[in-house]
Amino acid sequence: MATAKDRAQAKAGSGLNDDIGEQKRLELYRTQVVLREAEQRAYDLFLQNLVKGTSHLSLGQEAVAAGFAGAMKPGDLSFCTYRGHAHTLARGVPVEKVLGELMQRDNGLMRGKGGSMHLTSVDHGVMGSYAIIGAHLPIACGAAWRAQYKGDKDVSVCFFGDGTTNIGAFHEALNFAAVWKLPVIFVCENNLYMEYTPIGDVTAVPQPAADRASAYGLERILIDGNDADVVYRAAQIAFDKARAGEGPSLIECLTYRQSGHSRADPAKYRPEGELDRWKLRDPIKIYRERLLQFGVAERVIADIDAQVRKVVDDATEACKAAPPPPLDIIATDVYADGGWAWRN
Amino acid sequence: MATAKDRAQAKAGSGLNDDIGEQKRLELYRTQVVLREAEQRAYDLFLQNLVKGTSHLSLGQEAVAAGFAGAMKPGDLSFCTYRGHAHTLARGVPVEKVLGELMQRDNGLMRGKGGSMHLTSVDHGVMGSYAIIGAHLPIACGAAWRAQYKGDKDVSVCFFGDGTTNIGAFHEALNFAAVWKLPVIFVCENNLYMEYTPIGDVTAVPQPAADRASAYGLERILIDGNDADVVYRAAQIAFDKARAGEGPSLIECLTYRQSGHSRADPAKYRPEGELDRWKLRDPIKIYRERLLQFGVAERVIADIDAQVRKVVDDATEACKAAPPPPLDIIATDVYADGGWAWRN
Amino acid sequence: MAELTYRDAVIRGIAQEMSRDPDVVFLGEDVAKAGGVFKATVGLYEQFGPLRVRDTPISEQAILGAAMGAAMTGLKPIAEIMFSDFFAVCFDYIANEFPKSRYMSNGQVKCPLVVRTGNGAGSRFGAQHSQSVENWCMMIPGLKVVAPSNPRDVIGLLAASVRDPDPVIFLEHKSLYPTKGEVPDGEIVDTLGTAKVLRSGKDATICALALMVPRALEAAEKLKAKHGIDCEVVDVRSLVPLDTQTILGSVARTHRLFTVEENPRLCGWGAEIVSIVADEAFYDLDGPPVRITTPHIPLPAADILEDIVLPTPDRIAETVRRSLQS
Amino acid sequence: MAELTYRDAVIRGIAQEMSRDPDVVFLGEDVAKAGGVFKATVGLYEQFGPLRVRDTPISEQAILGAAMGAAMTGLKPIAEIMFSDFFAVCFDYIANEFPKSRYMSNGQVKCPLVVRTGNGAGSRFGAQHSQSVENWCMMIPGLKVVAPSNPRDVIGLLAASVRDPDPVIFLEHKSLYPTKGEVPDGEIVDTLGTAKVLRSGKDATICALALMVPRALEAAEKLKAKHGIDCEVVDVRSLVPLDTQTILGSVARTHRLFTVEENPRLCGWGAEIVSIVADEAFYDLDGPPVRITTPHIPLPAADILEDIVLPTPDRIAETVRRSLQS
Ligand SMILES: Cc1ncc(C[n+]2csc(CCOP(=O)(O)OP(=O)(O)O)c2C)c(N)n1
Ligand SMILES: Cc1ncc(C[n+]2csc(CCOP(=O)(O)OP(=O)(O)O)c2C)c(N)n1
Ligand SMILES: [Mg+2]
Ligand SMILES: [Mg+2]
């Protein structure tokens, strides 16, 4: 568990501080609502048997995606996991494209070739969603290396879970990034669980990412991942550091996934009451209160909610109407020649 | 570089402390001389073109091998790297068997099938030498798991270099051992270099192992690896901890390889004077002085030196006289049936 | 005799061996308290307790490394790698450590362990969770490789694998987990390296593995019904050791060879069997040996796309017919 | 025209491409200041500086992952993995990431990079530093795989690999590093997917790769001199893309096929070529296609043992003779 000092650090930066400004706050709110509505819709569509394959929702973790995306500039790059809907949407990828991919339609982001676990939208800086634990941490280093080499100010951001901190690639990437002083930000979303196993059962330190920062000469950063303002501020500091050429950051965000690990998981392994306690700290609930505290009118909030709902409804209809992908695309994009030309 | 505190810690336990006793001290000395003489002989034989393939000497690092082997009990297990001659010999494997393997003779430890990088003597508790960086750390965990499961008091000891701390398997093994509280000791021999690259150029922290202990909830242990007494004492503490069921230790030993990385390496990448400075701290020189301080007669020391030289001379002759392995062994021990029965 | 799912057969197979031998231990991610992500290990934790059924961190190298260290010192570990695609993150153990330790040590080190894994396509999981990796393993000298196609074989071959003195890769097909089959009561122990002729025929031999076995059988029925072509279907079951005698014997009777693989096209086990037959039984063959495989592509996620890339009964039947009638 | 070693050809090939394109960058263990453990990158650090030639920690996953991230965002990285055996510790990038990113993203992500590595036996390094791993790569859809047999091809194929839009595995044979060959002056760029007929002959086709090419040529000379058997020798050069036309064309002329591989026996590229020929040119074949391989064993360290397990000119010649004369 987090120490008292951790809790103090995690809280710091929350509360009534108007450094963020109304426009950004409304954006952070809107993003979170988009993620929530789109993913809840994905779940409904799954129940209707319209989402095939697997899918991994981030319900309850929206503040992390919104806070980081809110701090990103256009050239910045996101590297996500199979639990990547939220991060993909947060960069502005249309809901229709994401739901289309989950529904395996021709209007999907990758026309059904990738599926829910591999959402990619290079145009939006979403450089892929990776389904092998840890794989994308070194890859994000490489993208950061390009920026460093070219003298660009682009930053690569790599999102992953608590469980990912125990795999070899995590270690190699963190050391590598620190030694090369790469402009990359490693964001650990500690949602307390791997698939079904509590992270504490299999990790030698209480905070799987933060307690390891020192092993890479990095500062220990542990924040409240359910408060988009806190996330946004922490992100800004890390982006500034990266753009100033001062190297990587490792940020552990304390959060909770309110859904099961994947679509099929009823999450029975949770202790009684845990989910309810975390729902009291639901990021959207927190943020709605925050807006009200800052004097945003209820009506403005309701308008955003309604707009978002309409976007998601329209996307749903578009996807339902979309055809499945044509069969001839199975042969394209294996190699750059467009086909699968492994022989003459 | 080591901090002042590190240096103090590293020194602690050295000096005139008679906790070790003359018999053990003579054993520690003798072991170091065996390693030194055998490896110097290996180098001479290489110059005579009698050692084929590659070989990696530990000249200058003898105190680590001697100190740990001195603290081991018969059931304890050693897991070594390609730089494994010293650790193999230190467990009592005959010099002839090791030189025979280097010379690819039928009297070699594995009859030429493994070679210098894979010395293995299960009868002596040497459970193999592994040539893929990091591979044996998880394997040592597994052997420790067996002991834990069986309620034995055997401890697994895994030796590796500074460069090995940056590979994924290091991280996975350390966390795993800590979480399962396994009776395993991880011994990092920091000899300042990977093959030719200084470890400091590619590592995010000054002490590649010690500065990472906290990432696995372990104590930071950094010792003088050139003083066999210091090593022996640190080893004893770690063995006691392991046998008491209190889990793994990670010990970083500061040392220096006086030879090149492998037989072909002239080690030109060393800064001027570095080797000379370390030779002043040569482990055998240190230990000879230590014996004298404790009142051991020069003649006793000279006798040991002479006995060891004779053992190595005899082994050399035996190896030179030994035939190469018979060709029919290529087919055995691929599978347990004795042959390579992958088909009927 | 009882009807059992392939999934439950895995549970029964592991339980049979753990009950028999206290040195059999089991480790993997989410395998203990949660019963495995495919529910193929439910109840083992409750039955055998936390010392023998252990949850691990997400550390595939540590899982396989620990299994090896335990095996070489006397335990008989079963390690689960959740999806066979993840072999790539622990491939050093599979390719360089397990299979070489006995040889390099001149027989001193033994590595009797089993790696169980969920293999194969059909779940719309996309390119990184759907692969058939049997050739990743078959190509490595020193490994044994097994892939059962039905519940009875799951138990029998798993028992044989656990009792085998060498490292065995045990490939469970994810799409077969819900399928059912008759399983006799009592202990079941099979023999590695034995293929099974599941259907006799005189016109052609079809070799298949795992999920492709029921498809090959279905294709054979279609060929018989529609075209009067009579195929012999061989369930290869064990890639290493490979029962070449059964395969060569069948080809000697039918004079034609087809292999049906879920592997991508290049360097699969089909190529190995074709090469053995073409070399050793060249004059038995009346026509070209033909491999039916997944095309040489990463697997697509969408159902409609995944369905057309895996060999289907229709594609198998059509390929055989065209080849025999040309 | 100059005589160059294979080792120096690697240096020249990398330098040629780095001089041409500032986006070509190079990383690996001990490659920069030390010039590489095989001395195959000496001088590059001095010529191109520390921003383009970079030493890494011992972190093969980070090396390949970083190469991929750089490639997908616009650089053209060359990554060195010191020994090809170490592919096993970074196999996820080779098997699951590089080759699938383009497909899974429906063409959005590109991964133009080269992994160079020291492959093959002959140095008495034992089972974990001597493997031929071309089939580890060939079996993965989405990769290209190249293995030059001489200095000129090293430069030409390396240039083609660096300029290729797909991930290319470039296998340098360790035992060829000291060998010499004539190399033209000026820029050299070859074409991937092209095999070369190095010797014409009418009696049999011998396909070989890398170190096996000079051995196959030597065997062909012996067969001619001693037995009047006239072999065509094909240097396969590129396993993916595979120049099946050249191979099928040769077999159409000679009617017999032999493959000479350093791979262990099962599922090698020889099996792939045999299977393609047996399927597509069955009626061209006058006798069984035969694979000559390393036996299916881990490699032994001792010189005398290593020497008898790799295919030698004598073993190749004897196998061909026996097969043709039986
Ligand atoms: C190498 C590898 N091992 C195991 C898995 C299976 N797996 C998928 S998600 C997951 C849990 C990941 O936990 P965490 O990193 O905390 O992320 P979260 O799912 O909680 O977002 C596991 C074990 C995988 N995809 N890749
Ligand atoms: C996975 C892997 N990568 C690279 C190598 C090549 N290699 C052999 S020894 C070595 C340096 C190891 O340095 P360190 O761990 O400090 O051990 P030392 O040699 O100094 O004892 C390297 C890079 C290897 N054997 N395995
Ligand atoms: Mg988690
Ligand atoms: Mg070192």
Image (cartoon, coloured by chain):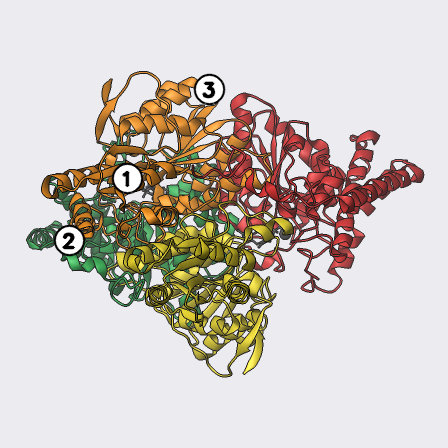
Chain colours: A green, B red, C orange, D yellow
Residue at the extreme top: C186
Amino acid type at circle 3 is Pro
In the picture, the quarter occupied by the N terminus of chain C is top left
Tell which circle, 3 or 1, labels the residue nearer the N-terminal end: 3
Measured from the top left, where is residue B119 in percent x and y?
64, 42
**Residue for badge 3:** C22
Q: Classify mark 1: helix, strand or loop.
A: helix
Query: Label 2 vs label 1: CA separation?
Result: 52 Å
In front here: C84 or B246? C84
Amino acid type at circle 2 is Gly
In front here: B165 or A70? B165
At a point 70% along the width and 32% down the height, the residue shown is B71
Query: Label 3 vs label 1: CA separation?
Result: 46 Å
Q: Nearer the viewer, mark 3 or mark 1?
A: 1
**Residue for badge 2:** A100
In front here: B160 or D102? D102
Measured from the top left, where is residue D18 in percent x and y?
47, 75
Query: Label 2 vs label 3: CA separation?
Result: 51 Å
Dot 1: chain letter: C
The quadrant where residue A327 appears: bottom left
**Residue for badge 1:** C253
Dot 3: chain letter: C
Q: Nearer the viewer, mark 2 or mark 3?
A: 3
Mark 3 residue's CB less than 8 Å from ligand 1: no
Callouts 2 and 1 on one subunit: no
In the picture, the quarter occupied by the C terminus of chain C is bottom left
Amino acid type at circle 1 is Arg
Residue D169 in the image: above or below residue C200: below
Q: Classify mark 3: helix, strand or loop.
A: loop
Residue D317 in the image: above or below residue A160: below
Dot 2: chain letter: A
